[in-house]
Amino acid sequence: MVERWKIKGELALSCSCTVFCPCVLSLGEHPPTEDRCQTWAGIRIDEGHFDDLDFAGLKLGLMMDLPGIMSRGNWTAALFVDDKASAQAVRAMTRIFTGRVGGTTHLLSILVGSFLGVRQTPISYETKGDTRVIKIDGFAEGALTPVKGKESDQNVVIRNSQYWIAPDVIVAKADKSRFRGFGRNWNLAGRSCEICQIDWGNG
């Protein structure tokens, strides 16, 4: 039986690139600005399910450490799941984010060479003004603010891309961004961020 899943909401990602991440436009064919990409993200789920299991209201986090060009793989990754999630939801999220049930995240089963596991912890994802304030308790915290365009009330947005996360990407910058865990200690303040409305699933 096919396991059907869907996640709709928002993803905010902070990475080590010194200018906007080249992976978005090159679709992973251009190297990161710092040779490797160190990145973490928060996800707010507004609607979602795994078969009959409801995900609405849950928060997630991701850590990804890429040794070079994104499309060449050999990523190291870890998943963080809201402490409010049930044991069944944690198992379902693990299947989704290791790419084992196909759909949008299937490429993770190809590109991730080392999956460090899942940690369940309190996760908050808030919008204060335009800034996304995210905390993965014990691991990461950040404040990610969109870059304004010529019209000061509008964000700079890349639209209609083929980027796997989402076609429309808000260009942003980290006012604050720290990740500590799995032997890593990153300070990504002042570096590239992206904010995306996500609509993922496998059918």
Image (tube, rainbow, N blue to C red):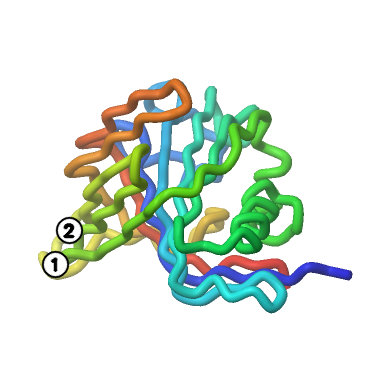
Is residue 197 something one can see in this rendering?
A: no
C-alpha span from label 2 to label 1: 7 Å
Q: Which residue is mark 2?
A: 148
Query: Residues at badges 2 and 1 in contact (C-beta under 8 Å)?
Result: yes
Q: Residue 37 at what x, y percent from top left?
A: 45, 30
Quarter the C terminus occupies: bottom right
In the rendered image of this protein, does residue 93 appear above or below residue 36?
A: below
On residue 151, which mark appears? 1
In terms of depth relative to the viewer, which is nearer, 57 or 100?
57
Drawn side of residue 95 relative to residue 84, left or right: right
Q: Residues within 10 Å of mark 1 (few under 14, many from 20)?
A: few
Q: Identify the residue at the far left of this view.
A: 152
Mark 2: which secondary structure?
loop
Is residue 190 something one can see in this rendering?
A: yes
| Amino acid carrying mark 1 in the image | Glu
| Amino acid carrying mark 2 in the image | Lys
Q: Residue at x 89, y 70 (%)?
A: 1
Q: Residues within 10 Å of mark 2 (few under 14, many from 20)?
A: some
Q: Residue 198 at what x, y percent from top left?
A: 49, 66
